[in-house]
Image (spheres, rainbow, N blue to C red):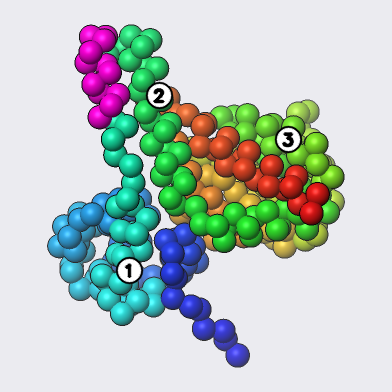
Amino acid sequence: MEVEEQVPVDLDTLRELIVKRYDSLSHRLQQVADFVMAQPMLVAVETMATIAEQANVPLSTLSRFANTMGYAGYSSMQALFRDQYLNRPRDYKERVKKARASEQVSQDSPTAIFHDFGQANIEAIEELQMSVSPQKLERAVALLNDADTIYIQGMRRAYPVAFYLCYALMKSDNNVVLLDDHGGMLRPMTRRMSNKDVLLTITYSPYAPETSELIDAAYAKGVPVVAITDNQMMDQGNKMEVCFEVKEGDVMGFRSLSSSMYLAQTLAVSLMCQDIK
Protein backbone atom coordinates (compact mmCIF):
# COMPACT_ATOMS: atom_id res chain seq x y z
CA MET A 1 0.00 0.00 0.00
CA GLU A 2 1.47 3.35 -1.06
CA VAL A 3 1.98 5.84 1.77
CA GLU A 4 0.40 9.21 1.03
CA GLU A 5 2.89 12.08 1.19
CA GLN A 6 2.02 14.92 3.50
CA VAL A 7 1.71 18.47 2.23
CA PRO A 8 5.03 20.30 2.88
CA VAL A 9 4.75 22.68 5.81
CA ASP A 10 8.09 24.43 5.21
CA LEU A 11 10.03 25.56 2.17
CA ASP A 12 12.82 23.05 2.70
CA THR A 13 10.41 20.12 2.51
CA LEU A 14 8.70 21.61 -0.54
CA ARG A 15 12.01 21.87 -2.37
CA GLU A 16 12.73 18.22 -1.64
CA LEU A 17 9.32 17.23 -2.98
CA ILE A 18 9.87 19.25 -6.16
CA VAL A 19 13.19 17.49 -6.78
CA LYS A 20 11.61 14.10 -6.12
CA ARG A 21 8.70 14.67 -8.52
CA TYR A 22 10.47 16.79 -11.13
CA ASP A 23 10.95 14.07 -13.75
CA SER A 24 7.25 13.14 -13.63
CA LEU A 25 6.04 16.72 -14.17
CA SER A 26 4.83 18.04 -17.51
CA HIS A 27 7.01 20.52 -19.40
CA ARG A 28 4.89 23.46 -18.20
CA LEU A 29 5.03 22.36 -14.58
CA GLN A 30 8.79 21.87 -14.86
CA GLN A 31 9.03 25.50 -15.98
CA VAL A 32 7.30 26.53 -12.76
CA ALA A 33 9.51 24.19 -10.73
CA ASP A 34 12.65 25.67 -12.29
CA PHE A 35 11.48 29.20 -11.52
CA VAL A 36 10.44 28.66 -7.89
CA MET A 37 13.68 26.79 -7.15
CA ALA A 38 15.83 29.50 -8.74
CA GLN A 39 13.89 32.60 -7.59
CA PRO A 40 12.34 31.92 -4.18
CA MET A 41 12.57 35.57 -3.14
CA LEU A 42 10.53 36.67 -6.16
CA VAL A 43 7.91 34.02 -5.42
CA ALA A 44 7.66 35.47 -1.92
CA VAL A 45 7.18 39.10 -2.92
CA GLU A 46 5.66 39.19 -6.42
CA THR A 47 2.07 38.77 -7.51
CA MET A 48 0.81 35.61 -9.14
CA ALA A 49 0.49 37.42 -12.47
CA THR A 50 4.09 38.60 -12.35
CA ILE A 51 5.39 35.13 -11.50
CA ALA A 52 3.39 33.59 -14.35
CA GLU A 53 4.80 36.16 -16.77
CA GLN A 54 8.40 35.67 -15.66
CA ALA A 55 8.09 31.89 -15.64
CA ASN A 56 6.46 32.14 -19.10
CA VAL A 57 3.42 30.05 -18.13
CA PRO A 58 -0.34 30.74 -17.89
CA LEU A 59 -1.79 31.68 -14.50
CA SER A 60 -3.63 28.39 -14.40
CA THR A 61 -0.31 26.52 -14.53
CA LEU A 62 0.76 28.10 -11.24
CA SER A 63 -2.44 26.86 -9.61
CA ARG A 64 -1.98 23.43 -11.14
CA PHE A 65 1.60 23.28 -9.87
CA ALA A 66 0.47 24.16 -6.35
CA ASN A 67 -2.24 21.48 -6.53
CA THR A 68 0.32 18.93 -7.71
CA MET A 69 2.39 19.67 -4.62
CA GLY A 70 -0.67 19.09 -2.45
CA TYR A 71 -1.87 22.65 -1.81
CA ALA A 72 -5.43 23.91 -2.16
CA GLY A 73 -4.20 26.87 -4.20
CA TYR A 74 -1.20 28.96 -5.20
CA SER A 75 -1.56 31.35 -2.25
CA SER A 76 -1.20 28.46 0.20
CA MET A 77 2.09 27.46 -1.40
CA GLN A 78 3.31 31.07 -1.67
CA ALA A 79 2.77 31.48 2.07
CA LEU A 80 5.78 29.21 2.69
CA PHE A 81 8.01 31.51 0.66
CA ARG A 82 6.66 34.60 2.40
CA ASP A 83 7.16 33.10 5.86
CA GLN A 84 10.78 32.40 5.04
CA TYR A 85 11.85 35.51 3.17
CA LEU A 86 9.77 38.57 4.04
CA ASN A 87 11.39 39.05 7.45
CA ARG A 88 14.88 39.03 5.98
CA PRO A 89 17.09 41.82 7.40
CA ARG A 90 17.58 44.51 4.77
CA ASP A 91 19.49 47.30 6.46
CA TYR A 92 23.07 46.05 6.10
CA LYS A 93 23.33 46.77 2.39
CA GLU A 94 22.25 50.36 2.93
CA ARG A 95 24.80 50.78 5.73
CA VAL A 96 27.60 49.57 3.47
CA LYS A 97 26.54 51.96 0.68
CA LYS A 98 26.68 54.88 3.09
CA ALA A 99 30.06 53.81 4.41
CA ARG A 100 31.52 53.58 0.93
CA ALA A 101 30.04 56.94 -0.06
CA SER A 102 31.48 58.66 2.99
CA GLU A 103 34.93 57.16 2.35
CA GLN A 104 34.81 58.20 -1.33
CA VAL A 105 36.59 55.03 -2.47
CA SER A 106 36.76 53.77 -6.04
CA GLN A 107 34.70 50.74 -7.03
CA ASP A 108 37.75 48.50 -7.52
CA SER A 109 39.78 49.61 -4.51
CA PRO A 110 40.71 47.06 -1.80
CA THR A 111 38.36 48.86 0.60
CA ALA A 112 35.43 48.65 -1.81
CA ILE A 113 36.12 44.98 -2.56
CA PHE A 114 36.42 44.31 1.18
CA HIS A 115 32.97 45.85 1.75
CA ASP A 116 31.49 44.04 -1.26
CA PHE A 117 32.68 40.62 -0.12
CA GLY A 118 31.52 41.32 3.43
CA GLN A 119 28.08 42.36 2.21
CA ALA A 120 27.77 39.41 -0.19
CA ASN A 121 28.82 36.88 2.45
CA ILE A 122 26.54 38.29 5.13
CA GLU A 123 23.56 38.22 2.79
CA ALA A 124 24.40 34.67 1.67
CA ILE A 125 24.66 33.42 5.26
CA GLU A 126 21.42 35.15 6.22
CA GLU A 127 19.69 33.44 3.29
CA LEU A 128 21.16 30.07 4.31
CA GLN A 129 19.90 30.56 7.86
CA MET A 130 16.39 31.08 6.52
CA SER A 131 16.44 28.29 3.96
CA VAL A 132 17.77 25.34 5.99
CA SER A 133 15.21 23.64 8.18
CA PRO A 134 16.02 22.14 11.61
CA GLN A 135 14.66 18.81 10.35
CA LYS A 136 17.22 18.68 7.53
CA LEU A 137 20.10 19.43 9.88
CA GLU A 138 18.91 16.76 12.33
CA ARG A 139 18.55 14.20 9.54
CA ALA A 140 22.03 14.87 8.17
CA VAL A 141 23.68 14.63 11.59
CA ALA A 142 21.77 11.42 12.40
CA LEU A 143 22.94 9.80 9.15
CA LEU A 144 26.54 10.82 9.76
CA ASN A 145 26.45 9.68 13.37
CA ASP A 146 25.08 6.23 12.47
CA ALA A 147 27.59 5.62 9.67
CA ASP A 148 30.38 3.08 10.04
CA THR A 149 32.56 5.27 7.83
CA ILE A 150 32.04 8.82 6.59
CA TYR A 151 33.50 9.27 3.12
CA ILE A 152 34.13 12.96 2.36
CA GLN A 153 34.73 14.28 -1.14
CA GLY A 154 35.02 17.63 -2.89
CA MET A 155 36.97 18.61 -6.01
CA ARG A 156 38.65 21.86 -7.01
CA ARG A 157 36.80 24.82 -5.42
CA ALA A 158 34.92 22.44 -3.12
CA TYR A 159 38.12 20.81 -1.83
CA PRO A 160 38.76 23.29 1.04
CA VAL A 161 35.33 22.50 2.50
CA ALA A 162 35.93 18.75 2.20
CA PHE A 163 39.38 19.07 3.77
CA TYR A 164 38.01 21.12 6.66
CA LEU A 165 35.27 18.54 7.32
CA CYS A 166 37.84 15.76 7.39
CA TYR A 167 40.13 17.75 9.68
CA ALA A 168 37.31 18.59 12.09
CA LEU A 169 35.77 15.11 12.17
CA MET A 170 39.13 13.46 12.82
CA LYS A 171 38.73 14.94 16.31
CA SER A 172 35.54 12.90 16.80
CA ASP A 173 35.04 9.18 17.35
CA ASN A 174 33.90 8.71 13.75
CA ASN A 175 35.82 6.81 11.10
CA VAL A 176 36.52 9.36 8.35
CA VAL A 177 38.03 8.96 4.88
CA LEU A 178 38.93 11.94 2.66
CA LEU A 179 38.55 11.02 -1.02
CA ASP A 180 41.02 13.31 -2.78
CA ASP A 181 41.94 11.09 -5.77
CA HIS A 182 45.68 11.53 -5.32
CA GLY A 183 47.44 9.05 -7.56
CA GLY A 184 44.15 8.05 -9.19
CA MET A 185 43.08 6.16 -6.06
CA LEU A 186 39.46 7.34 -5.88
CA ARG A 187 37.95 4.09 -7.18
CA PRO A 188 40.05 1.76 -4.97
CA MET A 189 39.33 3.92 -1.91
CA THR A 190 35.57 3.56 -2.40
CA ARG A 191 35.58 -0.14 -3.29
CA ARG A 192 34.42 -1.17 0.19
CA MET A 193 31.89 1.63 0.60
CA SER A 194 28.56 0.07 1.70
CA ASN A 195 25.05 1.02 2.75
CA LYS A 196 26.31 1.20 6.35
CA ASP A 197 28.45 4.19 5.39
CA VAL A 198 27.65 7.75 4.28
CA LEU A 199 29.05 9.83 1.45
CA LEU A 200 29.37 13.50 2.39
CA THR A 201 30.08 15.42 -0.80
CA ILE A 202 30.50 19.06 -1.78
CA THR A 203 30.00 20.08 -5.40
CA TYR A 204 29.36 23.31 -7.29
CA SER A 205 28.69 24.24 -10.91
CA PRO A 206 30.41 23.31 -13.17
CA TYR A 207 30.08 19.98 -11.39
CA ALA A 208 33.22 17.84 -11.33
CA PRO A 209 32.56 14.63 -13.29
CA GLU A 210 34.43 12.69 -10.60
CA THR A 211 31.87 13.84 -8.03
CA SER A 212 28.90 13.07 -10.25
CA GLU A 213 30.24 9.58 -10.91
CA LEU A 214 30.87 9.04 -7.20
CA ILE A 215 27.30 10.03 -6.31
CA ASP A 216 25.98 7.61 -8.94
CA ALA A 217 28.19 4.82 -7.58
CA ALA A 218 27.11 5.49 -4.00
CA TYR A 219 23.44 5.52 -4.97
CA ALA A 220 23.83 2.20 -6.81
CA LYS A 221 25.27 0.67 -3.62
CA GLY A 222 22.53 2.10 -1.41
CA VAL A 223 24.95 4.47 0.34
CA PRO A 224 23.15 7.56 1.74
CA VAL A 225 24.47 10.78 0.22
CA VAL A 226 24.61 14.04 2.17
CA ALA A 227 25.47 16.89 -0.18
CA ILE A 228 26.37 20.56 -0.05
CA THR A 229 25.76 22.06 -3.48
CA ASP A 230 24.62 25.22 -5.24
CA ASN A 231 21.66 23.70 -7.07
CA GLN A 232 19.41 20.99 -5.69
CA MET A 233 18.09 20.51 -9.24
CA MET A 234 21.42 19.14 -10.49
CA ASP A 235 21.28 15.79 -12.30
CA GLN A 236 22.08 13.77 -9.17
CA GLY A 237 19.74 15.78 -6.92
CA ASN A 238 17.19 12.98 -6.60
CA LYS A 239 19.93 10.55 -5.50
CA MET A 240 20.75 12.53 -2.37
CA GLU A 241 19.31 11.58 0.99
CA VAL A 242 19.98 15.10 2.29
CA CYS A 243 20.83 18.04 0.04
CA PHE A 244 21.84 21.46 1.38
CA GLU A 245 21.51 24.10 -1.33
CA VAL A 246 23.96 26.93 -0.68
CA LYS A 247 24.02 30.23 -2.57
CA GLU A 248 27.45 31.76 -2.01
CA GLY A 249 28.32 35.44 -2.14
CA ASP A 250 29.66 36.50 -5.55
CA VAL A 251 31.82 39.54 -6.26
CA MET A 252 33.12 40.17 -9.78
CA GLY A 253 32.64 36.51 -10.61
CA PHE A 254 34.59 35.28 -7.57
CA ARG A 255 32.37 33.04 -5.48
CA SER A 256 32.94 32.74 -1.76
CA LEU A 257 32.97 29.64 0.45
CA SER A 258 31.75 31.35 3.62
CA SER A 259 28.27 29.80 3.66
CA SER A 260 29.58 26.32 2.83
CA MET A 261 32.18 26.55 5.60
CA TYR A 262 29.52 27.79 8.01
CA LEU A 263 27.37 24.77 7.18
CA ALA A 264 30.35 22.38 7.30
CA GLN A 265 31.32 23.69 10.73
CA THR A 266 27.75 23.23 11.93
CA LEU A 267 27.67 19.60 10.79
CA ALA A 268 31.10 18.81 12.22
CA VAL A 269 30.52 20.34 15.65
CA SER A 270 27.00 18.88 15.86
CA LEU A 271 28.40 15.44 15.12
CA MET A 272 31.13 15.82 17.75
CA CYS A 273 28.46 16.80 20.28
CA GLN A 274 26.80 13.42 19.68
CA ASP A 275 29.90 11.75 21.17
CA ILE A 276 29.34 13.32 24.58
CA LYS A 277 25.60 12.62 24.90
Quarter occupied by the N terminus: bottom right
Q: Which residue is rendered at x = 37% and y = 55% of the image?
A: 84
100 relative position to 114: left or right: left
Closer to us: 161 or 22:
161
Tell me which segment is drawn in magenta.
94-105
Query: What kind of element bears circle 2?
Result: helix
Disc assigned to residue 168: 3
In depth, the one of 25 and 97 nearer the eye is: 97
Q: CA distance from mark 3 to mark 1?
A: 39 Å
The majority secondary structure of the magenta stretch comes to helix
Q: Amino acid at mark 1?
A: Met
Q: Residues within 10 Å of mark 3 (few under 14, many from 20)?
A: some
Residue labelled with disc 1: 77
- Which residue, given by chain and number where applicable, does mark 2 sit on? 117
Quadrant of the drawing holding the C terminus: bottom right
Residue closer to the observer: 217 or 43: 43
| N-terminal label among 1 and 2 | 1
- Residues at circles 3 and 1 in contact by the CB criterion of under 8 Å: no
The image shows residue 272, relative to residue 8, as above or below, that is above
Position of residue 244 measured from the top left corner of the image (x, y, whole percent): 53, 50
Magenta residue check for 217: no
Query: How far across and down, in percent of the image, does residue 68 sit?
Result: 36, 76
For the question of whether residue 153 can be seen, the reply is yes
Q: Judging from the image, what secondary structure is the residue with disc 3 in? A: helix
Neighbour class for label 2 at 10 Å: few (<14), some, many (≥20)?
Answer: some
Instruction: Report the Cα–Cα distance between label 3 and label 2.
Output: 26 Å
